[in-house]
Amino acid sequence: MTQGSCLCGAVRFEVDGPFTAMLTCHCSMCRKEHGSLFATFVSAPGAGFRWLSGQDKIETYASSDHGARSFCNVCGSTLPMVTPDNSLAIVPAGLLEGDPGIRLQGHMFVGSKAPWYQITDGAPQYDAYPPEFNGPPGIDRPMPAHRDGVTQGSCLCGDVAFEFSGAPGRVMNCHCSRCRHSRAAAHATNIFVKPDQFRLLRGEDKIRRYKVPDAQRFSVCFCTHCGGKVPLTYPELEIVLIPAGALDESPGMEPMAHIFVGSKAPWFEITDTVPQFEEYPPRT
């Protein structure tokens, strides 16, 4: 029996396995919804899935004609999905507590992956669904026209859009448990810019901010319509934190470090050469 929850803990669930698959998805919809460069899911028989609490906090967004995505309306965490015939539960692995006892079996929709992210493990790669899934084709998202010196982004539904100018100050992969639960992914890739570089283009009225009560600052912002993760500003630090998955184009900088790897998910293996730190990197 494996349990999991959203970031705020209002929505909890359990899955009576065994898990049958673990796959990472690189499609633009998953990137936008999770705010991460990829999302990893485990699947199990639907009959073994149970909501334990918080069903009244679940919002659903119809992301396409053949799919819907759910999220917690308190903290924005992406939530599990159960197929209409109850045959399969599809669970974002970042929400799980403990080790699910399964490891990555492949990457799907790599034909849509963020062009500035490199897959460095040896798992099989598929341009769309793996052949045995026989799933529908991907959906091409309209892309904003490129403008020199500007990086653009939006939430999944497009109600919230933003841009920043120039180069980021830093880009970090964070493996702490709060980032995993907030993004419902293996880790968060966060981009930091100065407030004078950042511009919110639309959707201020659609943004909800959730702060973890016992944290000094840790917060997440999400679109209340689709659950997509969007930037948040820390005025006292003079920074804007941008979820990398929300971007429509490369920020011009790759991650500088993996931080809080001492807290990383047991099912995720770091296979790139980016420097790793147990917690924060040392000040220089």
Image (cartoon, grey):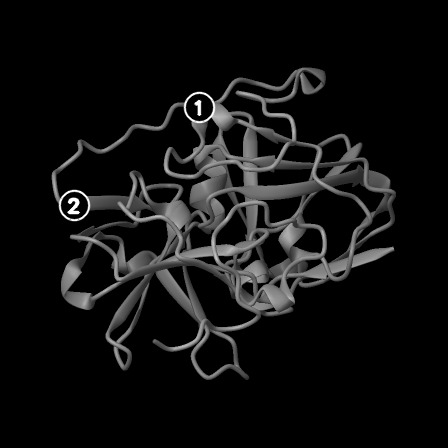
Does 53 sit above or below residue 108?
A: below
Residue, disc 1: 139
Circle 1 residues within 10 Å: few <14, some 14–19, many ≥20: few
Residue, disc 2: 150
Q: Depth check: give the residue in front, 21 or 87.
A: 21
Sequence order check, earlier mark of 1 and 2: 1
- For the N terminus, the quadrant is bottom right
In the displayed structure, does residue 220 sit left or right of residue 193?
A: right
Q: Secondary structure at mark 2?
A: strand
| Residue 205 can be seen, yes or no | yes
Q: Secondary structure at mark 1?
A: loop
- For the C terminus, the quadrant is bottom left
**Amino acid type at mark 2:** Val
Does 131 sit above or below residue 279?
A: above
- In this rendering, the label closer to the viewer, 1 or 2: 2
Does 175 sit above or below residue 279?
A: above
| Residue 12 can be seen, yes or no | no
* Count of marks overlaid on the render: 2
**Amino acid type at mark 1:** Ile
Q: Quadrant of residue 24?
A: top right
- Residue drawn at point x = 43 percent, y = 49 percent: 228
- Residue 258, given in percent of the width and then of the height, sits at 50, 59
